[in-house]
Structures are given as structure tokens and as C-alpha cells.
Image (cartoon, coloured by chain):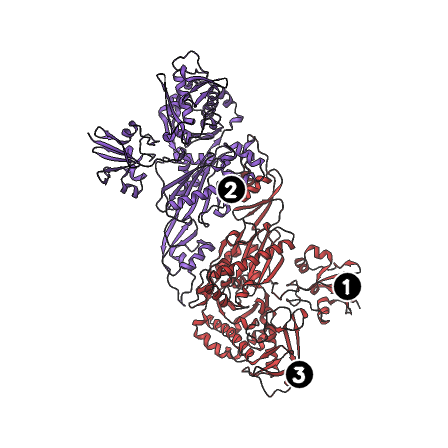
Chain colours: A purple, B red
Amino acid sequence: MPVVKVYAKNEAVAEIEVEKNSNLLDILQRNSFDIEASCGGKGVCGKCKVRVKKGQKPYLENLTPEEKRHLREDEISRGVRLACKVEVCEDLDVFLEKSSERANILSHFAVNDFEYEENIIVEKVVLQKPSLDDQKSFELRLKEIIGDCNLKVLPRTLQKLARLKDQEFYAVVYSDEVVDVKNCSLAFGLAVDIGTTTVVCYLVDLAEGKVVDFYSFVNPQKKFGADVISRIDFAREKEEGVFILQNEIIKELNTAIQILADKNSISKDDIYRMVFVGNPTMLHLLLGVDPQTIAVSPFVPVFTESICAKPNDLGLEINPAGTIEILNSISAYVGADIVAGILSTQMHKSSKVSLLLDLGTNGEMVLGNSNFMLACSTAAGPAFEGVNISCGMGAVEGAIDSVKIENGKVHFTTIGAKQPVGICGSGVVDAIAYMLKEGIIDETGRFCDKNDAYKSYMKEVNGQQAFFITDSVYITQKDIREIQLAKAAISAGIKTMIEHAKITEDDIENIYLAGGFGNYINPWSAIEIGIIPKKLQNKIIPVGNSAGAGAVLVLLNRKIALEAQEIGRKVKYIELSNSQDFNQFFVESMMFENDSQEGEER
Amino acid sequence: MPVVKVYAKNEAVAEIEVEKNSNLLDILQRNSFDIEASCGGKGVCGKCKVRVKKGQKPYLENLTPEEKRHLREDEISRGVRLACKVEVCEDLDVFLEKSSERANILSHFAVNDFEYEENIIVEKVVLQKPSLDDQKSFELRLKEIIGDCNLKVLPRTLQKLARLKDQEFYAVVYSDEVVDVKNCSLAFGLAVDIGTTTVVCYLVDLAEGKVVDFYSFVNPQKKFGADVISRIDFAREKEEGVFILQNEIIKELNTAIQILADKNSISKDDIYRMVFVGNPTMLHLLLGVDPQTIAVSPFVPVFTESICAKPNDLGLEINPAGTIEILNSISAYVGADIVAGILSTQMHKSSKVSLLLDLGTNGEMVLGNSNFMLACSTAAGPAFEGVNISCGMGAVEGAIDSVKIENGKVHFTTIGAKQPVGICGSGVVDAIAYMLKEGIIDETGRFCDKNDAYKSYMKEVNGQQAFFITDSVYITQKDIREIQLAKAAISAGIKTMIEHAKITEDDIENIYLAGGFGNYINPWSAIEIGIIPKKLQNKIIPVGNSAGAGAVLVLLNRKIALEAQEIGRKVKYIELSNSQDFNQFFVESMMFENDSQEGEER
């Protein structure tokens, strides 16, 4: 039997005898190594990177197409592989890559096909020498070589052209403009998903048409309010509040740009486009536009259409001749992130009805296909992100992110395998799902006094009953109520759309789970507590950061932005605060029971 | 007979009995009042403003269309009139308006018809109140009112929209963009002619379609070199020289913008467009583009095409959402100012052959009609601007600007009627023309020893003979040589174009004299010294600052910019440094003789 030696930080930590042809990811996970594999080992997420050697040599056998897609050339030559794609046939040394010390920010995504269209052209140029018989300007010579004399040229490009005209150089052409002339052929773009809690920036090589790196950070506006409404309150109440929030995000974005540029040995000037997605409030704040009308009925945003601006308009430090694009939104609470999500799932092009659930700080949902599209949003998110939960916390190191309660015992894992300091959304949902299954709580959400198997885990906290996962992390009766409200809102939203569309649950063929919570959540738990109807359990497809994926698509293909506008016009937004259906479904959904039967009978 | 009482600075300075129905301008000029009337009293230039009262009341009788065009409403109500349009039928009090204390910078121009096309639309807007059944964004509401949902909107406009949405406001739409929303309906533009020596800015009310004010200043780059070549040398030799020169002009332009805004009680933000014309070197320096290839053979500019930029690209302080347009040039020495001159004369649309002479610091000429257009340039200018002339100076206060030598006496005038301190181009040309006529110099340009009538005016200066106009202002033999070289260059340029076009002098139907010198020069003198063929003397039409006029046209009608590009493609540039014809004509033209006969015999 082959032997796998596992090294962490270059120290041998395990020696495992394995069956021939075993899957490496399985081996590592079974042996309690914390390998991230959000897609469950399908080769989609690209997260389960390990470095593999056979003797002294990098192990390059049976490299799969998925690996070629997710791994850079330099990684492959060092022996980096996706553990999920390696079958162990002989003795191997496996080096665990340094695991990310950062928050569990969703940065991966799955897109079936990157439709790449050359939108930025980089062309090598040598200008013909002028003479007294041929005195035309250097600018005209350049345009003639590029083959379009109607191209626009900005002053900055002319300044550089004056310096480069006598040598070989590269011209960068985008849309109807020569945006740059320079010594190198690099052309990059940034796709940015601004979440209320986290921001993810994808660095995209526009010439190669692929994502080469990403950088994510906690939205620095968080210190002025955890959710959309508290940010809007800050913007309204504080003088220049909008600009304070705008400056915060711009400053951090510039830091991200610098870090990504440095890390990839490019100049900030090599970045020519940025595409932004996010919820409407985040986009208003990005542009310095007062979002206060979003917070009060009738919930009207200042803008929803796509916006095109110059880097200087926002103070973003990419090439000043570059372009900043803000993708269009749908309504005050259904933003460009959802439009991007639709783009990445392509649900708007399919005849099959799909449901897109983006459960982040807010909960947004889209139901539809190529014929119709409905969207709605609920303020369900915060509880699922650990907000308003007694021991709740974000999905950062030390948070309990999964819980299993079985046979009188409680098991859990924490992010980064650290000492547990609290519990994040996916952990709470797991805990409640198992508490239901084990009869610790009943269908109404109340703790059952009669269950003795877990008596030792129950204690009072401030006069409330609570279930203790560790000595200091627990779930109270009130926490359960919070989750009940949140799950009822989402469930009722889904039902309202189904009702509105005059279809049944059975007509839904795909459920795309997007957003941070939607991806880390255990689908079984989500079904158990009734977020998703049980009969749809086999139709769940986690799509990672579909908002980021959509932004990348727009970056790679300008025409996709037009598709986004088409989606914006097509989607009908259902205002739930105004919907009698919703109110009724909401009340009906408060119970912990998987009510798909009921749904069908209506 | 009616009596005209003339007041200067509110003091009565003259009481004149006049024939009934006399023209007021004639009366004032015959009585030695210095009234500017560049168009010769045709009501075209609008310069001969005086304030007229009948008793205590403003005199408003027989107001002509020309006056209504040139005078603002507040001027008319104060009794301001164009002297050239007032017929004196009764006793009047005439108050001379304070004459400009500034340099004699050419700011007036003549354009037959301002083709005004609404290019900026200012629309009063009241947005419909949203409701839960109508949640569309305020931006969409705005676009719907304007009637174009594809309009672009920049972040800054959205920021303002968020503040104004609940009240009545104005939307400013230009091209495919809502460039502003605000409380007032003002929309202005600036047409700027950047000369090597002087810069003129015209403030244009874009909503009304008319020029409302102007401001001119000496090009601050002048301290780094008086002519194009010395500026280019500075830019090349000094580190960051290009940017030093750019900063100089931008700084002064921003001052001009502020002054014009203050003077007209508008905000800088009410200015949405700037159109620039100038010679190619000035335009290169405006954009910070190194112009050094303009100075050396084969004389190639970095750009000649029109450039469109944002105010921030150049640091110009108008509305940041506004547009900066640089009109296209033709070659290294035939700039956008000449293209604008062609536009303002409309010679490119006429079947008649015209000659446009723009004699500023450089001498540029265009010959042609709707079928063909030729252009060339000579470095003739500096002498005509007082450069390299012993007592030469620019056309500023104290400069002798006209000279008459007759009957053994010398008469002259100075700019601003000040103590003479030097002589400017028009004075030098006058002096030499009369010296020729009176036989003080001969056809070769040499002083004639035998002429005794003016003996008292002749003296030696540094071993050279000189003719003294005043005790300290004189013309030397070398000065005469400078003028001979300059006039030969222009004359030879004209002949080269005529030769190239295979036409004769007789085919030329209009001579448009443009540029500072071209307008202040006495046509008789210009013909006498042989700049212009004598047989064309009746065809001379002074067109003032035709470059500025063309820039204003572009500001008032966006389509004119396309016409300018058409002109740029159509005009064939003749490189004189490469032309054998020119060299021959140049030698032939050195003599002071009006050689139109010769020209015809060739």
C-alpha cells in the first residue's frame, strides 16, 4: 500500500498508509487535516491546493483540466495540485500550503464558461520615420497602424507618445480610445464585489482573459454600522457622513490595488478597468451619493442604472485613462451583486426555472428563467451572519462554523482550527438543525424540558435557557427566535415569488446558493430548519461568490454589461413590505417544520 | 444745429455744433476723440460704445439691430449705444466709456452668421414623487422627463440629484450625458485662442447662443521665450520644461476663468465647455506634450487631430463634468487657430478664391475655396510684432502704433495716448511705408543721403543711420532689413501658393487679414511696402480675431467641429523650407516695390 507523508510548515506531521487509488483530499480530510474544499471536491472551487512531491521531484502525473484551470504555471512546476484531483498510486510527500490566516471570506466562484472577448487590445507598434515629404503627426501614424483613425487619444497618452515615438512600444486600445502607450504589454482589470461586511477584489489579466489573483478585506465602513440601515443612518446623521463612508472604502480599495499590483509585479498603471458590484447602498456610498431614501418607505434608490466614470472621479488609483464601471442594480435592496449573480448562473438564459438565494448580510432572492424573473429581498441576513446572536460573530478565526449534535455528544469545528470564541451563522444553523433533530427544541422553537440526553449541556443564562456548545459558547431561546424570524422571512420570500409566478416548488430545477452564508451553510441544516423546502434538496448548487463571478464576466466581455442592463429591465421587483402574501407566508413559516407539503397544497 | 456735449470721466470736455443727422462716430473721430472702431463704423465690431443721454434720460431712439446684438440689456437701459449707429438729430450728451487700459489685444471679430444650434440643453425639472407602487430610482425619473433613458450620468451629478430630488431644479444635458443638476439655469462656455504672445478667452452664454464677455492676457510663457522656437528650446533644455510651461498657461487660464465668472456673476461650475485654438506648439504645451519635433526638420507635431479631454485632465477649473475640446491643426506650424479662421470666414464653402493671412508672431496663410485649399507658414512674424526692432515693442500702452510722414513732418499716435516709449509692428510698417513714399529710403531699403526735407530727423545710432520719430524712438537701417526679410517671406509664401494652385493674383477675390498685426496694420502701408499685392488692395477684409471667432462657432454648434476636421483633411500643407519656388520668390521679394506686375508676367 502506498504511503503518504504529510508535511506542515516543512515538518513531517503524519505518515499514512492508504489504499491504492485513494483520493488525496479524502485521505487528508479523514485524517483531520483542515483542507478547504468549498465545492466538495469537484474541482470547481480550486481551494484544496497542496504541494506534492515524489522523491525529490514535483509530482506532475495525471494533471487534470481542472487543475490546469485553477493553477498558475509556476504553481504547477512546483508540484502544486488540487488534492481533490490526485489519486494516490505510489508513495508521495504532501506539503500543506500555508493556510490562509484571514477571515473566511468567500472569494471563489464557479462559472461554467468564461466568455472572453477581446475588449482591451494591446498592440506592439513601431512608427514609421517621418520626412519632409511625410510630415503627418505621430498620433496619426499610431492610429494608422492600429487601423482606426477615429480613435480618441487623451493628453496623457500624447505626452507618453512624445517620449516613445522613436522606439518600439505597446498601444493599449479600449473601446474607441487609445488609453495608453508604454513599454510593456500588460493590461489588467479589477472586478470588485463590495459587500456590507466584506469586499473581494479579483485581479484579471485582460490580455489572457483570466483571473490571476484576488484580495479581500473587511469593509472598513463596518465600524460605522454593521448593516445597510445603520450605515445609512450614519450617513444621514453625521455631517459629511456620506463622504466619510466613501473615503473609507476608497482608501481601502487603493490599498488593495497597491497590494495586488505589488504581489503580481505589475504597476497600478497597468490596470485599465474596474467593474464594481454590490448592494445599492454600498454602491451609493462608493459614489458618495446619499442613500437615505433607501432606508425609508417607499425605499427608492437615487440610481439603479449602470454608471461609467473615470478613476479620478472617485479617487481610485488605477491608470487615470482607465474606466470605472458600476453594474446596474434592480431596486433599493436588490443590487448589482444580484444582477452579477444572475449573469454568472445564466439563469436568465435557461428555460428551466431557477432560484438564486444570496444570503449575505441581507437576503436577496431571484426566481425565474428566460421568460420571467422576479426578485425580492428581506432583512433576514444579520442573524445568519452572527448578528443579534448571544455568542454570535462573523465567519472569522475562532468562530464555530459547524456543529454536530448526536448520541448525546456535541462536536464542532472552528475556523482556522482555533480555540472557539463564538459562533458564526453556519454554526448556529447547524446547532439548531441538530437540536431539532435530537428533540432538544420542538417545532415551535421552544426548549423541551423532557429531553434528558443533553441535560448536561443545558444551563440558564440571564434567566434564559441556553444550550452550551462549549463552556462559553451557547445558544439561547432568544437566539433561536432570531433564527426563526430570519428563516421565516426567507422562506416566505421564496413562497411569495412562487405564488406570484403562478408555479409550484416542483417547477424549480436549480437552487443556486450564493453569498458568504449561502456557501458555508450545511445544506442539510438549511433544509432541516426550513430555509429551503425539503423536496428541493437535490437541486442545491453552491455557486460561491457569484456576484464576483459576474463582475469578472463583465470585465472579460464588454457585451455582458449590456446583458446586465437587459436583466435589470426584465426583473420584476416584489416589494415585500407591501405584500399581503408575504405577511401570511411569514406567519406560516415561523414554525420549524419543513412545510413543503403545505406549500404544495395551497 | 444740434449740439453734442462730450463728457470724459464725467467732466465736460467738448461742446460741438454739428450738422443735423451727422453720424456720432464721425463727429467724435473728427474731433480727435480716440474711439475704437475696428470695423470702420459698420456696426460689426461693437467697440465704439458711448453712453448717450438726452437731457436726464438715456437716449434710446432708433436703436438698430446691430446695437441690440452688441449691447447687453443693462447697457441699453443705461443709454449705451454704438456711436457708429447714432444719427444726431437733436442736442445730446455723450459720455465716453472708460477706455480699456489694457494691451491692444485683438479681441473683437466679425462673423456673418452665428450658426447656433442647441448643443447644451438646460431643462427645468420636477420629479414625480415615488410610492410603494412606483419605486424607480430618481435618476430614472430624471431621464424619463428629459426623454432619453440612455443618457449617462456621472457620480457627481448623482450626488447633487440626491440633494435636489424633492424640489424644482435644472438639468444640464450635453451630448449623451446629464452633466449637471442644479438650482439655476446658467450654462456657459469658453472659447480660448492661445497665441504665442496673447491669450483671449470669450465667455459664451450657451443657452442664449452669444458672446457675453471676454478676457485677454499676455501669454505667461512669454517670459521663457518670445516665440515658438524659444519656447520649444526651453521645454527641451529645462528639466520638466514642458510641464513648467503647461503650468504657467493653466494657472493663468484658471485666473481668467475666475475673473470672467466673478465679473458676470456666475459660478465656475456654470461653465461646461472650453474650446481651444492656437498654434500647434501652444496646444502641445497646453496639453503638456513635448513639442520638440516641431522645431527640427522634418517638423512633425505629436498630434494634429482634435482632442477631447476632461477639465481634470488639464487642471482647468470649470465644471468637472464639462468638456475640454482642442480643435484640430493642419501641420506643425499651421494650427487650430488657422482652422478656426477658415471656419469663421467660411472660405472653405465659397466658390470664390480667398486668401487668409494671419500675421501674428508667426505668419500663416491659406489660399483656396470650396475646391482646394493650400496652407503654408513662415517665421515672418516677430519683426512685425516689434521683435528684433531697435525700439520695437508689443502693441501695449505707450507704443507708437501709427505713423504719418508728410510735408517734412512726422505725426504719430500711441496706444492709450500715452508718452511714446517704443514702436509696435503697425507703427514700423507705417513708418517704412512713408519713408519709401517720401524718398527717405529707396527701393533697396537703403537710406537716401540726398533727401534733405527730413534731414533733421536723421541721426547716427551706434554707427548706423537712423530715422527718429521721437527723441528716443527711431528706425535703423537694420530695422528696415528685418522688415524687408519678413515682408519678403510673406510675399513669397503667397506667391508660392498661387503658383502651386495654378491660379493668378487676379483670381483672388477676398483677402482676409486676421491676427493682431493683420488688424492693426494700415492696409495702405501693407500694400506700400509690398506685403500685399497692390492690385488686391480693394479686396482686403479685416476679420479681427478670426481664430477666436472660429472657436466661438465650435462652442455654439457642435457640428462645426466636424467641419473643422473636414478642413484639416482637405488643406494641403506646403512645406516652404523644402520649396524651390519659395526660395526664388523670397529673393525676388526682398526689394521694396509693389511687384504685382511682375507676378502677373511670370
Say if labels 1 and 3 share a chain: yes
Report which residue position mark 3 lands on: B408
> Which one is earlier in the sequence, the residue at label 1 or at label 3?
1
Report which residue position mark 2 lands on: A247
Element type at mark 2 = helix
Q: Chain of mark 3?
A: B
Report which residue position mark 1 lands on: B93
Q: Using a 10 Å C-alpha cutoff, classify the residue at mark 2 as few (fewer than 14 neighbours), some (14 to 19) or many (20 or more).
A: many
Residue B266 shows in the view? yes
The CA span between labels 1 and 3 is: 39 Å
User: The residue under label 1 is which amino acid type?
Assistant: Asp
Q: Chain of mark 1?
A: B
User: The residue under label 3 is which amino acid type?
Assistant: Gly
The CA span between labels 1 and 2 is: 63 Å
User: The residue under label 2 is which amino acid type?
Assistant: Asn
Please tell me which residue is depicted at 30% across the width and 43% down the height of the picture: A74
Residue B162 drawn above or below residue B99: above
Please tell me which residue is depicted at 57% across the width and 80% down the height of the picture: B476
Which numbered dot is residue A425?
Answer: none
Between tags 1 and 3, which lies in front?
3
Q: Position of residue A32 (x, y in %)?
A: 31, 28
Q: Position of residue A265 (x, y in %)?
A: 37, 47
Residue B405 drawn above or below residue B137: below
Task: Residue A11: name its quadrant.
Answer: top left
Q: Position of residue A247 (x, y in %)?
A: 51, 42
Q: Quadrant of the N terminus of chain B?
A: bottom right
Q: Chain of mark 2?
A: A
Q: Position of residue B257 (x, y in %)?
A: 59, 55
* B309 lies left or right of A62: right
Q: Using a 10 Å C-alpha cutoff, classify the residue at mark 1 as few (fewer than 14 neighbours), some (14 to 19) or many (20 or more).
A: many
